[in-house]
Image (spheres, rainbow, N blue to C red):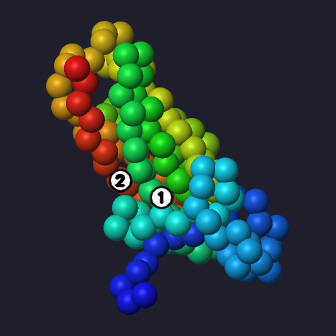
Amino acid sequence: MAGLSGVILADACSDEDDLVRRLHDNSRDTYDAELRWIPAAGTATLATPSGRVALSAFTAVVSAPAVTVRYALSGSASVALSLGSGVVARAGGRPGFGMLAWNRRLGSTRAPKGRYSLAVTATTAGHIARQTLNVRLS
């Protein structure tokens, strides 16, 4: 397909041959499958001495107690969720899917209703990849 680009995440492949085998035998995209396709349009990448790491922050779910952001990484990186200039959640990201949760607090007070822009940042070896998701608190 012309123009198709993205990242394939393989959570549990032991080596390159295992990845190729899974691409041919198990290429369906379901929640439990180990191979997943992340479109390039929603992917930020960072170059490291050991290769490229892709970050895709693909959903933010707003609930009464928290905002949960789901993301995918193609390599190891520290992951942070920021609101403005402050970090509201952190994780030691491993390759695959992960999530960060913001308790909807700004300091010690509950965040007021409104629209917010959340930045998901992956950092490794001094390199940064960032994506933003917009949410509305009601």
- The mark nearer the N terminus, 2 or 1, is 1
- Residue 105: name its quadrant: top left
Residue at position x 61%, y 43% from top? 92
Circle 2 is placed at which residue position?
131
Where in the figure is residue 14, as x and y percent of width and height?
Answer: 82, 67
Q: Residue 8 location in percent, x, y?
A: 57, 69
User: Mark 1: which secondary structure?
Assistant: strand
**Depicted 28 relative to depicted 97: above or below:** below
Tag 2 and tag 1, C-beta contact below 8 Å: yes
* Residue 127: mark: none
**Three-letter residue code for mark 1:** Leu
Image quadrant occupied by the N terminus: bottom left
Outermost residue toward the bottom in this view: 2
Q: Quadrant of residue 74?
A: bottom right
Count of marks, rendered view: 2
The structure residue drawn at horizontal position 30% and vertical position 12%, both measured from the top left corner, is 110
Q: Residue furthest left?
A: 114
Q: Residues within 10 Å of mark 2 (few under 14, many from 20)?
A: some
Q: Residue at x 41, y 16 (%)?
A: 65
**Secondary element at tag 2:** strand
Circle 1 residue = 55
Give the amino acid type for the residue marked by disc 2 in the picture. Answer: Gln
The reply to whether residue 14 is visible in this rendering is yes
